[in-house]
Image (tube, grey):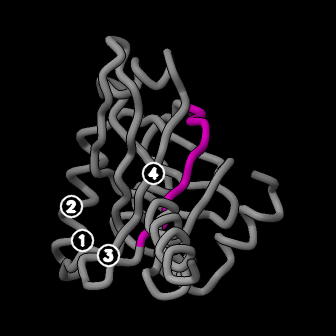
Amino acid sequence: MEQHEINEILNRPLSQEMLARDLTRLAYVAEDGTPRNIPIGFTWNGAEIVMCTATNAPKLRHLRANPMVALTIDTEVHPPKILLIRGRAELDLVEGIPDEYLQMNGSYEMTPEQRVEWEAGVRSLYDGMVRIVVTPTWAKLIDFETTLPSAVEELIRRQEERARA
């Protein structure tokens, strides 16, 4: 997929809405070859998806061995809105707490007092974190109104061909 095609998809208003959400599902392959898919907080900086994790998180070992990942950001309504992204994870060890980690947790419902307590707890727990940075190399937006999964598009095309025959 060409960069201009990726940019066109990610710059659509619905994609921007999806990129402003709290959670993505990060899919990767473990060293034993089995798939993993985990929910993880993220932030979009306009060019990259940034996720943060503990320096001892098992997923880091697997991402070092195979950095290719897939991300799903979706809604919980019908019809669902789904943003699919593929890319390569770059791992960046950071001393202290990355700004992105504090930003990505900023939309959870917390009182100002709860926020202060949460941030103090985070700062006392982590000496450092790892930023997992994914630059999209492929993207697809599915809204079930103007865009569909490719398999459904194929079924519709076949149905139309049968109707014409």
Per the image, label 2 sits on a secondary structure element best described as: helix
The answer to which of marks 4 and 1 sits earlier in the sequence is: 4
Per the image, label 1 sits on a secondary structure element best described as: helix
Q: Which residue is mark 3?
A: 75
Q: CA distance from mark 1 to mark 3?
A: 25 Å
Q: Quadrant of the C terminus?
A: bottom right
- Report x, y in % for residue 34: 30, 22
The answer to whether residue 19 shows anywhere in this view is no
Q: Which residue is mark 4?
A: 71
Q: CA distance from mark 4 to mark 1?
A: 28 Å
The magenta stretch is: 82-91
Kindly report which numbered mark, 1 or 3, lies closer to the viewer in this rendering: 3
The answer to which of marks 2 and 4 sits earlier in the sequence is: 4
Q: CA distance from mark 1 to mark 2?
A: 5 Å
The answer to which of marks 3 and 2 sits earlier in the sequence is: 3
Contact, CB < 8 Å: mark 1 with mark 2?
yes
Seen at 25% across and 83% down, the residue is 77
- Of residues 100 and 16, the one nearer the viewer is 16
**Callout 1, which amino acid?**
Arg
Q: Quadrant of residue 49?
A: bottom right
Dominant SS of magenta comes to strand
Seen at 49% across and 57% down, the residue is 100
